[in-house]
Amino acid sequence: MSEAWQAVEELERTELKALFDADPERVGRLSVAEAGIRFDFSKTHLDAAALRAFVRLAEAQDLAGRRDALFSGQVVNPSEGRAAEHSAERGQGAPESVQRARGFHSRMRALIDAIEAEAFGPIRHILHVGIGGSALGPDFVVDALGRGENMRYDTAIVSNVDGAALEEAVRGFDPETTLLVIASKTFTTTETMLNARSALAWMGEAGVSDPYGRVIALTASPEKAVAFGVDETRILPFSETVGGRYSLWSSIGFPAALALGWEAFETLLEGAAAMDRHFRLAPPERNAPLLAAFVDRYYANVAGAETRAVFAYDERLRLLPPYLQQLEMESNGKSVRLDGGEVGRASAAITWGGVGTDAQHAVFQLLHQGTHLVPVEFVASVEPGHALDPEHHRQLLVNCFAQGAALMAGRGGDDPHRFYPGGRPSTTILLDRVDPATLGALIAFYEHRTFANAVLLGINPFDQFGVELGKEMAKAMDGAGAPDFDPSTLALMARAFGDEGEE
Ligand code: F6P
């Protein structure tokens, strides 16, 4: 174990409330305001000693060097021999990569202009099929920002291979005025290809004369899209060096750019770029993604928390938790380091969460009185997203802030059933408003926090071999020949598929 890690793991467990008495400047010291977002880490166990230990760890793990490598387009994903150039999509990266991304964006914009000019006839609906990173980012952004008159097209994002998802999505869509967007970096993903074929069949059966003429493909494998039957002029490529769960900023963001308008998409990129600059330039003690990673490591590696919970206190951000689940767990849910050695300590926490205030009436019992330590993250916006009685928003924020205060303060007393231990940590992320710039900055904050966690742990956040075995076994189960599966699996197959398995 490195000395720097040892110093972190030996940090004393301090009493959360006492930290405020010990340091009257604590809130200011542990709050960062950047790109329209205030990050308050003061209700966590980070104190001066912990900060010193983590800053030393960041130095020992060469955070600055790894960050430079990330932004300069060097290979930071060695198991796949690739750079990770999502920040080049927002203008922050190696000049040639930024240039290439701009070229791809120009194609995207030209296609959007053509759609708006009715080159495909009148389009009312966007049916986007994709999964994982090819769905979660666009879905989150469209859902967050595409409300009311901001939503220019009826948009459905379908990921699940369950036909019920597609069937439900197109209910009420007119096939004649639907644009089919197929999003897949590899253009081989089973779920997406099947959904794409079924969507084309739905159009064909409804009498659309040239369903393939209504297809837009978003992919880093344009040749596969051509082989699928998509005309080259309607393929929006992006670079192989943009990872799936980091691809919102590339052509994968097309449904967001189309549904919300190009200006909104560009502003989303600018917001993300502001966070890129902050992550690159701010000193560690004032660097929001890095401080958040310190908090994550403290709870996972010092306090032994196995999960972290994120609650969006804003209806527009309701898809933040599932978005983060992929970003954080697919990136850092790993047991080996970059060099193939064991990580030897807890890596990514299990990310879970929901929306406030609903979650208060469901899972918060465990957070306040349960036996697990769960660091909580509250995400809210100062400005409301509706024109109803301001009392709604006031209640939303009052509840959000009160929960954080209650988790920390606790309440004593003689009745064990009504006793709250307190001392439970939380972070609050308060957006000025939910708009394209702030949302872009928020998502980039999470990307960089994930990267910073990976650097501290010494792992590669940009590959995802853990998802391959299950895919391969599904293919094997689907294939011909005697399946080589365990008796339990064979019995399930027999029950579901008849004589294909053995009982
Ligand atoms: O199975 C995991 C994964 O590879 C994700 O990393 C990715 O975002 C998703 O599948 C979809 O992949 P694609 O964009 O190639 O269809």
Image: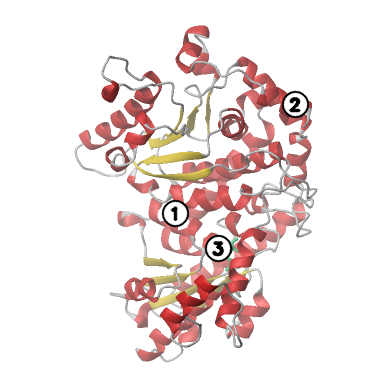
Labelled pair 2, 1 in contact (Cβ < 8 Å): no
Residue at the spot of label 2: 4
Task: Tell me the amino acid under the disc marked 2.
Answer: Ala
Quadrant containing the N terminus is: top right
Query: Relative to 257, is 404 above or below?
Result: above
Q: Amino acid at mark 3?
A: Ile
Residue drawn at x 39%, y 85% is: 203
Horizontal placement of 241 versus 412: left or right? right
Where does residue 107 sit, x and y in percent of width and height?
Answer: 60, 68
Q: Secondary structure at mark 2?
A: helix
Q: Which residue is mark 3?
A: 252
Report whether the residue tagged 1 is closer than 8 Å to ligand 1.
Answer: no
Q: Earlier in the sequence, mark 2 or mark 1?
A: 2
Disc 2/disc 3 C-alpha distance (Å): 39 Å
Is the Cβ of the residue at disc 1 closer than 8 Å to that at disc 3?
Answer: no
**Whether residue 283 can be seen here:** no
Residue 346 percent location from the top left of the image = 62, 39
SS at mark 1 in the image: helix
Residue nearest the observer in this picture, 378 or 3: 3
Q: Nearer the viewer, residue 68 or 303?
A: 303
The quarter holding residue 302 reads: top right
Q: CA distance from mark 1 to mark 3?
A: 12 Å
Residue designated by label 1 = 140
Residue 30 locus on image (x, y percent): 54, 21
Bin the neighbour count of mark 1 within 10 Å (Cα to Cα): few under 14, some 14-19, many 20 and up.
Answer: many
